Image (spheres, rainbow, N blue to C red):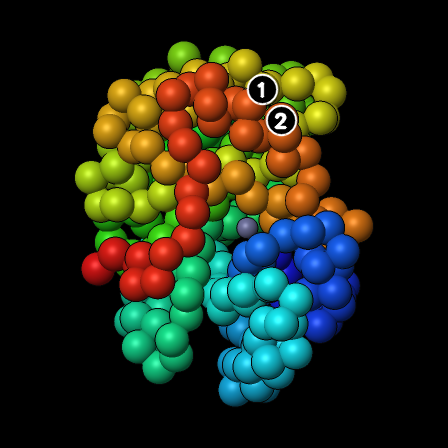
């Protein structure tokens, strides 16, 4: 989840911890954004201050049964490998998330990334980037593979994943081969029109590629979103023959 160390985060690390205890969660990971947007305005937390707050939260909440994991979410780190590797070498993160947020200079959160293009060509390039990320960046998870389905669905209706099977399975193969855990982001699981059937197909392809663990992730940017739709996500993971990811120390692959 994201704290106020991200531009789009709404709650402090301490507030996230308080809500985790209220919800009965045993582990949370605070994974704030590191971005290299095409406009050149590099975004990253002040990680010295971030780790001070993580240490304070660990001390305060350990007695309440909460493990607070450190982490970060790297946007398109395969395009900024030297900076990303430098950051990962400098700090001891428990969880490293790799994401595709940018495609051909466009932000994939907005429908304009499809302007003038065949949507399946855009999806194909998105998953080709995801494969490259999985192959080259030492991340624990590859995040929200369906993030681009939201603007795509807004514009064209829910996608048919069989039309992007080649590049999508290449990305899943790369994750399985390099030990990256597939994340099932729970943000869109109750959106209409639904693409949950497509998510199940993708999870089954990941299982067929040799992937087993799936990180069911709320991607909360505020406390009200913590733990959202966990049961639906867990149901999809089980239906695909996968198991929910459980964090262990030293779990970031090389
Ligand atoms: Zn993201």
Nearer-the-camera pick, 72 or 129: 72
Residue under circle 1?
Answer: 196
What is the total number of numbered labels drawn onto the structure image?
2
Disc number lying in front (1 or 2): 2
Expressed as whole percent of the image width and height from the top left, the position of residue 136 reads 24, 54
Disc 2 residue crowd, few under 14, some 14–19, many 20+, Cα 10 Å: some
Q: Residue at x 54, y 73 (%)?
A: 44
Q: Are marks 1 and 2 in contact (CB under 8 Å)?
A: yes
Q: Residue at x 53, y 39 (%)?
A: 216
Expressed as whole percent of the image width and height from the top left, the position of residue 147 reads 56, 37
Q: Is residue 121 left or right of residue 176?
A: right
Expressed as whole percent of the image width and height from the top left, the position of residue 38 reads 50, 61
Disc 1 residue crowd, few under 14, some 14–19, many 20+, Cα 10 Å: some
Q: Which labelled disc corresponds to residue 59? A: none
Real-space Cα distance between discs 1 and 2? 10 Å
| Residue 212, quarter of picture | top left
| Identity of the residue furthest to the right in this view | 224
């Amino acid at each position: 989840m994201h704290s106020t160390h991200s531009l789009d985060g709404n709650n402090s690390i301490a507030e996230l911890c308080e809500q985790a205890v209220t919800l009965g969660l045993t582990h949370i990971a605070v994974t704030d954004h590191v971005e290299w947007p095409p406009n050149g305005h590099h975004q990253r937390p002040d990680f010295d201050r971030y780790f001070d707050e993580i240490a304070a939260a660990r001390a305060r909440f350990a007695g309440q049964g909460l493990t607070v994991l450190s982490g970060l979410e790297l946007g398109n780190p395969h395009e900024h490998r030297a900076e990303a590797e430098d950051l990962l070498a400098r700090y001891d993160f428990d969880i490293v998330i790799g994401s595709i947020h940018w495609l051909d200079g466009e932000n994939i959160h907005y429908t304009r990334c499809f302007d003038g293009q065949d949507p399946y060509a855009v999806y194909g390039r998105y998953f080709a980037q995801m494969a490259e990320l999985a192959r080259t960046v030492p991340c624990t998870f590859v995040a929200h593979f369906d993030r681009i389905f939201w603007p795509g669905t807004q514009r064209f209706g829910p996608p048919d994943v069989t039309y992007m099977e080649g590049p999508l399975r290449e990305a899943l193969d790369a994750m399985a081969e390099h030990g990256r855990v597939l994340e099932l982001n729970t943000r869109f699981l109750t959106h209409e029109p639904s693409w949950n059937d497509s998510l199940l197909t993708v999870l089954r392809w990941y299982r067929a590629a040799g992937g087993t663990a799936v990180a069911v992730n709320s991607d909360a940017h505020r406390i009200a979103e913590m733990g959202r739709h966990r049961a639906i996500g867990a149901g999809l993971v089980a239906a695909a023959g996968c198991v929910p990811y459980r964090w262990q120390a030293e779990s970031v692959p090389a």
